[in-house]
Amino acid sequence: MSHSRLSTALDDGLIALPDGNIALMRPSATYDVSALPRDRVQIVHGFFPDAAAWLAGGYDVTEQLSKVAVAVVVVPRAKALARAMVAEACANADLVIVDGQKTDGVDSLFKMCRKALGALPSITKGHGRVFWFASTDAFADWTAPPPAKGPHGYFTTAGVFSDGAVDAGSALLAEALPKKLPARMADLGAGWGFLADPVLARDGVKSLDLIEAEALSVQCAKLNVSDPRVAFHWGDATRFETGGYDGIVMNPPFHSSRASDPSLGRDFIQAASRLLAPHGKLWMVANRHLPYEATLAECFRNVDMISGNGAFKVFHANRPHR
């Protein structure tokens, strides 16, 4: 592991850590904590795969930030969420450290913080920046409001996928679903629950499991979907263990960072094949440029493209290989 920005700042004596606990907010599973006293580190996370990795590594993991001496804000891609995390850190910590990549907007956040506070110490390294400051109420208005209904009529919040509008791919998938669906259904990567209504409106559906890795999205889904046939699961769809579904719908993610990563979609396809019963069926939408056909053919005996447009393609697959 390369020497990170945070480790450099600590090892060079540029940041003096006060006594007390240190909370890392939304660090990736590979984030460098080697320069921090392990017994004082807590992980605050809402993304299940990363949270599970830190928990497996023996760290204290929680979804909610409590009062600590130091809060390290690891900048996410979502600008509104990054601002909300800074406000939350200021409300709960004595020292706030902000660390992130340029591609995730850390420089923009640095400029906003500097505009409010004046000159701030920082280090640029590895295509990113770390900066720090004493807790302040200057960013109180950055606090994220509770989930609210958007113009589309659904509850969303800062940091969830497609928070301002219904995703066009999901809308196309909903239109392509048949009038009747199998009894026991699941939505892998369910987000804030848009596909639930069109699935539940089909004949034959007796249960629907919404499986989503982002806790903020699960929170919104619970506000958007009240049908008693629905169960909510905060978990990693690619590692989910409950199987035997008759049918699965999904609009799998294809970004782990700014760059497109088709392996995420392939992992979802393989998970769907594993989670479906032998007679199970899959309905899936994907961006047209993503090369999922080969993986679908490897995982299912029958694969058809049933809908599409210039941006998306919708597949129906059945009889998963075992």
Image (tube, rainbow, N blue to C red):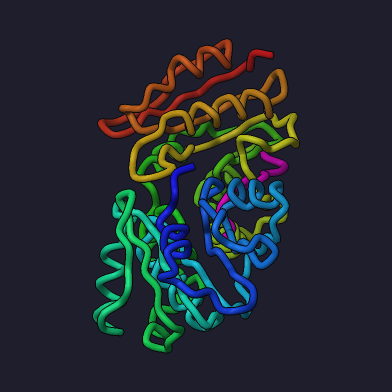
Asked if residue 208 lies in the magenta stretch, the reply is yes
Q: Dividing the image into 4 quarters, which one contains the C terminus?
A: top right
| Relative horizontal placement of residue 63, taking residue 284 as reference (left or right) | right
Q: Residue at x 63, y 38 (%)?
A: 203
Magenta stretch bounds: 205-215
Residue 138, percent from left and from top: 37, 87
Rendering coords of residue 32 (x, y %):
52, 52
Q: Quadrant of residue 287?
A: top left
Asked if 216 appears above or below 171 in the picture, the reply is below
Name of the residue lying farthest toward the front: 12
Q: Picture coordinates of residue 219 (x, y %)?
A: 59, 63
Q: Is residue 73 left or right of residue 29?
A: left
Q: How many marks?
A: 0
Residue 209, image x, y percentages: 67, 45
- The residue depicted at 64 percent of the width and 13 percent of the height is 321
Residue 141 visible:
yes
Q: Residue furthest bottom?
A: 137
Q: Is residue 17 left or right of residue 117?
A: right
Asked if residue 81 can be seen in this view, the reply is: no
Question: Within the magenta stretch, is there residue 34?
Answer: no
Q: Is residue 292 or residue 40 the one in the foreground?
A: 40
Quadrant of residue 310 in the image?
A: top left
